[in-house]
Image: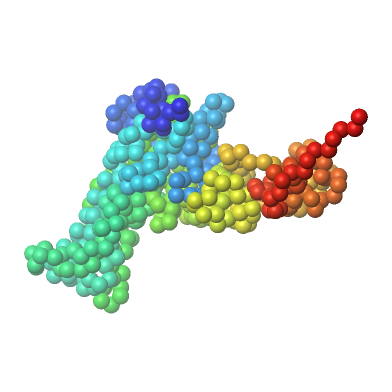
Amino acid sequence: MALHDLDIARRATLRRITDIARERLGIADEHLVPYGHYKAKIALPWLQSLDERPDGKLILVTATSPTPAGEGKTTTSVGLADGMNRLGHKAVLALREPSIGPVFGMKGGAAGGGHAQVVPMEDINLHFTGDFHAIALAHNLLAAVLDNHVHQGNAMGIDVRRVFWRRVMDMNDRALRHIAVGLGGPANGYPREGGFDIVAASEVMAVLCLSRSMSDLKERLGRIVVAETRDRKPVTAADLRAHGAMAVLLKDALAPNLVQTLENNPALLHGGPFGNIAHGCNSVIATRAALKLGDYAITEAGFGADLGAEKFFDIKCRIAGLQPTAAVLVTTVRALKMQGGVPRTRWRRRTWRRWRPAWPTWSATCTSCARCSACPAWWRPTTSWPTPRPSTRCCKAAWPRAACPTPCRATGPMAARARPSWRAKWWRCAISTPRARRASPTTTRTACGTRRCRWRRRCTAPRRSPPAPRPRRA
């Protein structure tokens, strides 16, 4: 029986994080802040001393059309890092921290799966080093300062109908999305509408992940717009003089966290903004540290490539001055079916026809990744599916322009390895094909006695009894 992810993580042999930092990354013990034996934070002053080191190569892992259960970006990232280290390359992993809300939801943890996990998995999926709690405190501190300013006289003339700043908590609770605050009389503030968001959707989380130093963090926190005045002028955290106290609460959360994979390879986990609310990537500090500490830095972008990868290229790379060397696009059969409009109840069926509407989106995703990185790569789906017969035409006419991995089949240097034609109508019944193709192994005999293509799941011909066998001649 296959082991559960939790059982695999508990049976793993972990090494002390100080040994991994010293042997694999060259970090002395005095530059680490241990949180137990298997997790630690790297001191920011020591990371700032690495600015003169040359950067390694950056590899981005993204996916197409993620389904509610996830498509394995983190698992692929961890497996890629373990594989490159097994081959002798010095690869450092840089991922996001999981939020406790989705951990207890349908999606579950975000530390990988199977034998490609980051450990200690239970600590990572729960409280970890307290970064999310520090971000929640800083966020709610700003909300409290805002409400207190209005309660104490509202010297800035804030319009209570135009307060944008909500409170946060690291849990999924739809009953707190829209609430009324300030009830109970004058001593409890002023009544107004409010609500709670999850910590990963906080603007403080996005600010933390885009900051490069404590001074940069304080400056970015001061530019957060929380409300408007009656004259429709913006009110920022610096106007309320709350950004300094918020930065103090985040002084430890700004340092990246160091853990390990199941194969005892180093991994940096820091930050976890959502891709639909913010940019959906880990912190700039962790990514820059991975580039300085290894020859290859492997990171991921949340959600699909049309959302997380685009924000990674357009926001994070521009702010941090990053240039990806390669992009790994995780594509599964289930994601293609969802993009093609297949109902969720039919994802387990072999509905090959419904893949076709998903190919234009997949081709556009490949084009986007190829434009923003030096070398796009693909990870084949794990579900077994039949491969169409190769076509004698040029593969560039059959594959999408961005996805054509080989030159012409007839004249190219890789003619023997040319990919099959996806424009071939391989679902067509073999009866309508020439006699030479009828004898090919791609056709099979159905229960009704007719010949059909093996790509078709059911024969549409009327059901009839098979013909009686002819007697042999004497």
* Quadrant (top left, top right, bottom left, bottom right) of the C terminus: top right
Residue 46 in sight here: no
- Residue at coordinates 26% horizontally, 58% vertically from top-left? 175
Q: Position of residue 258 (x, y in %)?
A: 38, 34
* Quadrant (top left, top right, bottom left, bottom right) of the N terminus: top left
Say left or right for 456 vs 87.
right
Say left or right for 117 vs 189.
right
Q: What coloring was used for the rendering? A: rainbow
Count of numbered badges drawn on the protein: 0
Q: Quadrant of residue 9?
A: top left
Say left or right for 199 vs 298.
left
Looking at this rendering, what residue extends furthest in the right direction?
474
Q: Quadrant of residue 50?
A: top left
- Residue at coordinates 41% horizontally, 31% vertically from top-left? 4
Asked whether 440 or 339 is in front, the reply is: 440
Say left or right for 285 vs 401.
left
Q: Position of residue 346 (x, y in %)?
A: 53, 50
- Residue at coordinates 51% horizontally, 38% vertically from top-left? 76
- Residue at coordinates 25% horizontally, 72% vertically from top-left? 161
Looking at this rendering, what residue extends furthest in the bottom direction?
231
Q: Taking 357 as reference, is 164 above or below it? A: below
Q: Taking 441 as reference, is 353 above or below it? A: below
Q: Position of residue 367 (x, y in %)?
A: 63, 53
Q: Position of residue 39 (x, y in %)?
A: 34, 31
Residue 107 in sight here: yes
Q: Taking 449 as reference, is 49 above or below it? A: above
Asked whether 40 or 420 is in front, the reply is: 420
